[in-house]
Amino acid sequence: MNNPERSETAATGQAACTASDGVPHEAVIAPGPGSLRELFWSFTLLALQGFGGVHAVAQRELVDNRRWLTREAFIEDWAVAQIMPGPNVVNLSIILGERYFGLRGAAMALAGMLALPILILLTMAALYGSVQHQPAAQGALRGMAAVAAGLITATGLKLIPALQANVMGPWVSAGVAALTFMAIAWLRLPLAAVLLVLGTVACGWAFRSLGHRPSDSA
């Protein structure tokens, strides 16, 4: 039995991957998960692949492998998940679950993100308690942290081409990203302050840019 919400989302996804000149940005976008079970196991597998953060894995699974989202749509959804309270990828799972199956989908996607990973986490925490002071264990954690940082950096670089379609333009978008990096990584300013200042400036610039776009391309 077809879900009308899912059908509408599929049509939206197909339209989102086509530019105003009719040239597709991506390969054919799938209509999304076919059932709640597929949604649950998709986010379970996504969560089990995440080490030090699931951002890189989420982009690869949702955009490259399953093709539920275009790169542009992923960036937009991730931006919403980023500014909401709570873990980013958990927010993203709730957004996508609700989009395809409503409240049941949001609950199922959230369960997929948390159920099995929590069991593994509790088991690993119990085991780590007995070896946490060992040099080998501490070295392994430092190595994993470096790998996680590399994955996040690689994902950010991979998504840069999607800024070509951003309403602010690629150069302004890159400038905002560079200022954000310097403010947090170099000046070590609080994240909330950076989000409030640069986020407000970026939103204002985007609103201004939307107002100057031709009506037929809005």
Image (cartoon, helix red, strand yellow):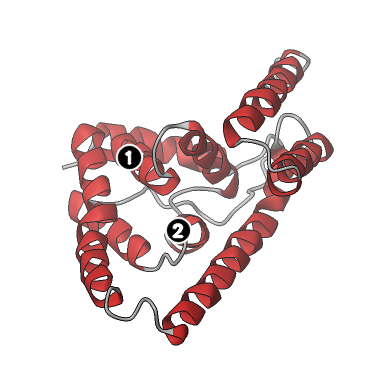
Q: Which mark is residue 94?
A: 1
Q: Quadrant of the N terminus?
A: top left
Q: Position of residue 72 (x, y in %)?
A: 60, 43
Q: Which mark is residue 19?
A: none
Q: Which residue is outermost to the front?
A: 133
According to the image, label 2 marks what residue?
A: 54
Callout 1: few (<14), some (14-19), or many (20+) C-alpha neighbours within 10 Å? many
Q: Quadrant of residue 84?
A: top left
Q: Residue at x 48, y 51 (%)?
A: 29
| Badge 2 amino acid | Val
Q: Residue sitting at 51 percent across and 42 percent down?
A: 78
- Mark 2 touches mark 1? (CB < 8 Å): no
* Element marked by disc 1: helix
**Foreground residue among 55 and 209:** 55
Q: Secondary structure beneath disc 2?
A: loop
The answer to whether residue 61 is above or below residue 31 is below
Q: Nearer the viewer, mark 2 or mark 1?
A: 2
Q: Is residue 172 above or below residue 68?
A: above
Name the kind of residue labelled 1 in the image.
Ile
Q: Which one is earlier in the sequence, the residue at label 2 or at label 1?
A: 2
Mark 2: few/some/many CA within 10 Å (<14, 14-19, 20+): many
Q: CA distance from mark 2 to mark 1?
A: 15 Å
- Residue 14 at x, y = what percent? 49, 42
Write the residue at 21% across / 33% down. Answer: 103
